[in-house]
Image (cartoon, rainbow, N blue to C red):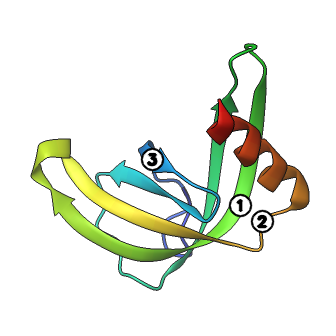
């Protein structure tokens, strides 16, 4: 994840949907902040798709059980190709 004031933040995904994803990071981020996400979808046939999407932070809370901040990111204007890859990934 990259933010306007912090170009490289490592995180791990906790969930994903067609409209956004949950992340866990070491950084507390204000809701409403725009960001850029890059993540890899791994499919059952062992192929992958690298997605790069713009998003907006919907919320950020301290998740003691997750050892970091739980962030909800809402996708903004994803491409048709990324949407198709997400559909394929979610269908398993």
Picture coordinates of residue 5 (x, y %)?
A: 50, 74
Where does the N terminus fall, quadrant-wise?
Answer: bottom right
Query: Residue at 68% of width from left, 17% of height from top?
Result: 44
Badge 2 element: loop
Q: State the residue lying farthest toward the right.
A: 80
Q: Which residue is mark 1?
A: 53
Q: CA distance from mark 2 to mark 3?
A: 17 Å
Residue 58 shows in this picture: yes
Residue 79 lies, with reference to residue 92, above or below; the image says: below
Badge 1 element: strand
- Depth check, mark 1 against mark 2: the one in front is 2
**Callout 3: 10 Å neighbours few (<14), some, many (20+)?**
few
Q: Which residue is mark 2?
A: 78
Horizontally, is 83 left or right of 35 in the view?
right
Mark 2 vs mark 3: which is more N-terminal?
Answer: 3
Mark 3 vs mark 1: which is more N-terminal?
Answer: 3
Q: Which residue is mark 3?
A: 15
Residue 87 lies, with reference to residue 19, above or below; the image says: above
Horizontally, is 1 left or right of 15 in the view?
right
Picture coordinates of residue 36 (x, y %)?
A: 63, 64
């Amino acid at each position: 994840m990259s933010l306007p004031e912090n170009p490289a933040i490592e995180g791990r995904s906790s969930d994903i949907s067609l409209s956004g994803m949950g992340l866990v990071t070491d950084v507390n981020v204000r809701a409403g902040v725009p960001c850029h996400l890059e993540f890899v979808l791994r499919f059952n046939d062992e192929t992958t798709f690298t997605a790069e999407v713009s998003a907006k932070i919907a919320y950020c809370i301290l998740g003691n059980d997750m050892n970091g901040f739980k962030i909800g990111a809402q996708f903004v204007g994803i491409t048709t190709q990324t949407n198709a890859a997400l559909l394929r990934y979610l269908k398993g």
